Image (tube, rainbow, N blue to C red):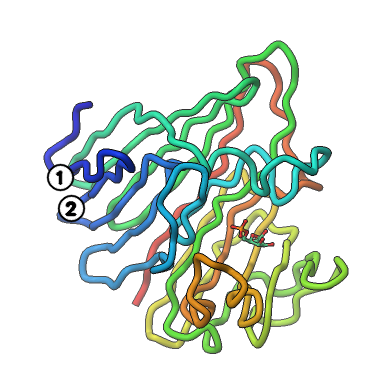
Amino acid sequence: MHLPPNVRLSGSDYPVFEIDHPTCKARVALHGAHVMSWKPRDEDEVLYLSPDSVYKEGKAIRGGIPICWPWFNAHPTNPDAPSHGLARTRFWEMISAEEDENGVTMRFGMEEGIWKAEVTVKAGLELEVSLETLNTNEIPIVVSGALHSYFSVSDIGNVRVVNLEDTDYLDTVEEPTRRKQKGAVKFAGEVDSIYDSSGKVLLVDDDSGRTILIEKSGSPSTVVWNPWLEKAAAMGDLPDDGYLAFCCVEAAIANDRAVIVMPGSSHVLSTRISVEE
Ligand code: TA6
């Protein structure tokens, strides 16, 4: 496996690619093609990674950017299928790793039955993660999912997610209820909202003086999530107070907006993350 000078491999049983480039430091696990960490030069860590995350095959890392694919949340028809698909709970293959003065680009692939995907991670002064669904079958396939990004924040109580104003969404905390977003998204309890949103640049502002910008493509849905106190306490891979330190803003394809990928074609879901002071 050829690695460029600013990428090294750690962990034999659970390989993690450690990127230490002049533009950023980052960590990407082979398991789930999972970006665990991204710290642009002169900035603090942008992604949240639970200190209680479990690193073993079959268990999704808690934090970073889980690849939820080829379905979002529960499988549309099979109750026994794992929530959020099969991509984040297995080892992928590394296809390539290259670097230039702008950063490091790594590509990963997986194939299981009719499902074939490639993930491209471009880590530099910005971070871009792209998930390409490749339909090499003779039949159309239906795909949903999410790039389930966990963003590190100073205190969830100070966070505002901006540019979802007046957007329709499904509030799934209790009985799923259609609502319209009034003002910025704020957090004073559990939030689990699926927005009908594909366009604008989303901003995560936490009054720390830093704003995280999220540009999506191939994503007809945006998911905003924080488990809050009770659900965090019930999660074995998240500290009880871990909910205070992150919010998820996800480039998603919710099940009701699933994408049909025709034979011989592909679909790309991507999120591009940057930071402004
Ligand atoms: O991000 C939205 C969501 O679907 C929530 O409903 C919650 O289940 C979250 O994903 C985390 O799911 P996980 O399977 O990683 O615990």
Q: Which mark is residue 6?
A: 1
Ligand 1 closer than 8 Å to the CB at disc 1? Answer: no
Percent position of residue 242, x then y: 49, 77
Residue 37 figure quarter: bottom left
For image coordinates 54% across by 78% down, the residue present is 243
For image coordinates 69% across by 27% down, the residue present is 261
Report if residue 244 is visible in the image.
Answer: yes
Quadrant where the C terminus is found in the figure: bottom left
Percent position of residue 63, x then y: 47, 61
For image coordinates 61% across by 15% down, the residue present is 136
Q: Which mark is residue 20?
A: 2
Q: How many marks?
A: 2
Left or right for 20, reference 93? left
Residue 112 figure quarter: top right
Circle 2 packing at 10 Å, graded few (<14), some (14-19), many (20+), is some
Circle 1 packing at 10 Å, graded few (<14), some (14-19), many (20+), is some
Are the residues flagged by discs 1 and 2 in contact, CB closer than 8 Å? yes
